[in-house]
Image (spheres, rainbow, N blue to C red):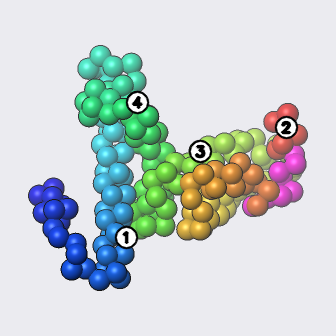
């Protein structure tokens, strides 16, 4: 914390354009690592029941009170805490392959894939479908911001298992 405060106050005029751009990227990577840490702390607090024990109806309410956050950032942090519990997503963010918002989109996409794919069109390997969807979304996160990634996620079965997409849409209707 102290080192970050010193760096934040340091003069930047002497940095070259390339150094400034590199420093900005490194600061973003550090920010994402801190968001992962916050999400893990929030998840641990929620798992322990701290929000309820302190009289809050929700994790977001606890965060608003404890951290003096506005409602939307508190809800976002609570959602990130849940999303980053998906296997691999914490590491994907820490490796710089996605940011926390993209990881939340990937998690919601995986959660939205129907559990009953095997009943739609013969023998289907559900675990393989989920793995392929996660891999595709992570790869796309390197190219697309979260809002575009969300659009792709809505139709992920069309990308990874087009033969199942129509059956899944029909079953959903």
Magenta-drawn stretch, dominant element (helix, strand or loop) = helix
Q: Nearer the viewer, residue 60 or 16?
A: 16
Give the answer, above or below, for where 6 lies relative to 18: above
Residue at x-position 26% and y-position 34%:
67
Q: Circle 3: is it few (<14), some (14-19), or many (20+) Cα within 10 Å? A: some
What residue is pinned by disc 1? Answer: 25
Q: Mark 4 points at which residue?
A: 71
Q: Looking at the image, is mark 2 or mark 4 nearer the viewer?
A: 4
Mark 3 or mark 1: which comes first in sequence?
1
Q: Are marks 3 and 1 in contact (CB under 8 Å)?
A: no
Q: Residue at x 15, y 58 (%)?
A: 5
Foreground mark, 1 or 2?
1
**Mark closest to the chain's N terminus, 1 or 4:** 1
Q: In the figure, residue 26 lies in which quadrant?
A: bottom left
Mark 2 or 4, nearer chain start = 4
Side of 123 where 96 appears, left or right: left
Front one among 35 and 111 = 35
Magenta span of residues? 160-167
Q: Mark 2 points at which residue?
A: 171
Helix or strand or loop: what does disc 3 sit on? helix
Camera sees residue 152: yes
Residue 63 visible from this viewpoint: no
Return the disc, 4 or 3, that comes first in the chain's sequence. 4
């Amino acid at each position: 914390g102290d080192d970050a405060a010193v760096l934040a106050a340091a003069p930047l005029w002497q940095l070259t354009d390339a150094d400034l751009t590199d420093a900005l990227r490194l600061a973003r990577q550090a920010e994402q690592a801190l968001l992962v840490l916050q999400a893990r702390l929030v998840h641990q607090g929620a798992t322990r029941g701290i929000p309820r024990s302190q009289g809050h109806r929700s994790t977001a309410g606890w965060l608003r009170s404890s951290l003096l956050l506005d409602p939307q950032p508190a809800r976002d942090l609570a959602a990130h805490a849940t999303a980053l519990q998906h296997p691999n997503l914490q590491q994907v963010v820490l490796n710089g392959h996605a940011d926390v918002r993209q990881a939340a989109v990937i998690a919601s996409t995986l959660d939205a894939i129907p559990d009953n794919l095997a009943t739609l069109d013969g023998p289907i390997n559900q675990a393989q479908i989920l793995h392929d969807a996660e891999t595709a979304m992570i790869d796309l996160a390197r190219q697309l911001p979260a809002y575009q990634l969300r659009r792709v996620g809505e139709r992920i079965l069309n990308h990874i298992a087009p033969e199942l997409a129509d059956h899944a849409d029909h079953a959903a209707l």
